[in-house]
Structures are given as C-alpha cells and as structure tokens.
Image: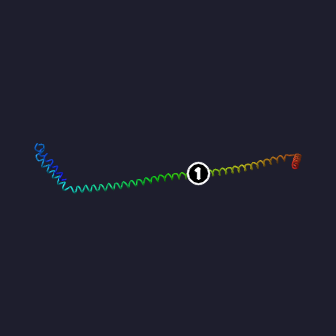
Amino acid sequence: MLKYILGLILAFMPTLALAAEEGGVEPHMGWRVINFVLFVGILYYFLRKPVAEFFRTRRESIKKELEEAEQLKEEAEKLYEETKRKLERLEDEIKSLLETYESMAKNERDQILKEVEKAINRILASIEEEKASILSKARMLLLKKMSKEAIENLKKKFENLTPEEHAKINDKFIRSLQQ
C-alpha cells in the first residue's frame, strides 16, 4: 500500500511543479502535498494493523450475527409452522366440539319434547278420566233427582186415587206379570 502512495506522489510531482511555475499553485504547495502524503503514510503505517484487525473482527462479528439471525429465522419459521398446525388442529377440534354440542342439544331438545308430549298426554288422559267421572256423577245425581221427583209424583198421584182406580191399576199390574 505504501508503494501505491509513493507512486501517486511521484506521479503528481511533475504536475505540481509545473503548476507552481505558472503561478496557478501557491509557492509552498509542493511541501504541503508532501507533508500530507507523509501524514497519510504515517497514519497508514501505524493504523493499518489495528484498522485491519478492527475490520476483520467486525466482519467476523457481522458474519456471526448473520448466522445467528439465520438460525433464529429458521427457529421462528419452525415455531410458526408448529403454531399453524396447532391452530388447524384447534379449529378442527372446535368444529368437532360444536357438532357434538349441537347433536347433544338436538337430542336433549327431542327428549324434552317427548317428555312434554308424554306429560300432555297424561294430562289429557287425566282430564278425560275426570270428565268421565264428572259426567258419571252428574248422571247419577240427575237419575237420583229424577227418581225422587218421579217417586214424589207417583206418591201424589196414588194419594189422590180413588179405591176403584186402585183396583184397576192392581188388575193391570197382575195381568202384566202373567204374560
């Protein structure tokens, strides 16, 4: 590298000298350029190893960080795929649970409807029995009342009958028994 810098200095020396003669450059410009080139050369000489080491270690640390980033990326992709599979399984499980619960709800509804229907049928049968019982009691009461009224009417008629009418009725009754 030092060779390149010296080569550049030597290449530009005639140009600087020519420019100094024509008055386009300051009189001490050549010494300034030489001082600058020497300064750069000294910096290069003392700093080349630390700078090269810095850039080498920096390159290695960047390389390590890139490798670690790649590993992290691969792990993240694996985790993403695993999570995706778990979510798909979870969605399937949710669908399965929903179908199961819907089926259970339908069965429960059907069972409740059957029980309600049985209860309604029992209530209707009970109502029919009660109705028949009430009608039977009403007939009995009506028959009793009609019988009492008929007996009362017959008693009144028999009380008002004359002895001839009594005899006539008795004869008619006896004839009906003989036939």
Label tally: 1
Q: Nearer the viewer, residue 125 or 8?
A: 8
Residue 83 location (% of width, % of height)? 42, 54
Q: In the shown orientation, is residue 69 left or right of residue 49?
A: right
Q: Nearer the viewer, residue 121 or 9?
A: 9
Give above or below for 16 relative to 53. Answer: above
Q: In the shown orientation, is residue 30 left or right of residue 90?
A: left
Residue 114 location (% of width, % of height)? 61, 51
Residue 8 location (% of width, % of height)? 17, 49
Q: In the shown orientation, is residue 143 left or right of residue 119?
A: right
Which color scheme did the rendering employ for the protein? Answer: rainbow
Residue 26 location (% of width, % of height)? 12, 45
Q: Residues within 10 Å of mark 1 (few under 14, many from 20)?
A: few
Question: Residue at 59% across / 51% down in the picture?
Answer: 110
> In terms of secondary structure, where does tag 1 sit?
helix
- Amino acid type at circle 1 is Asp
Residue pointed to by mark 1: 110
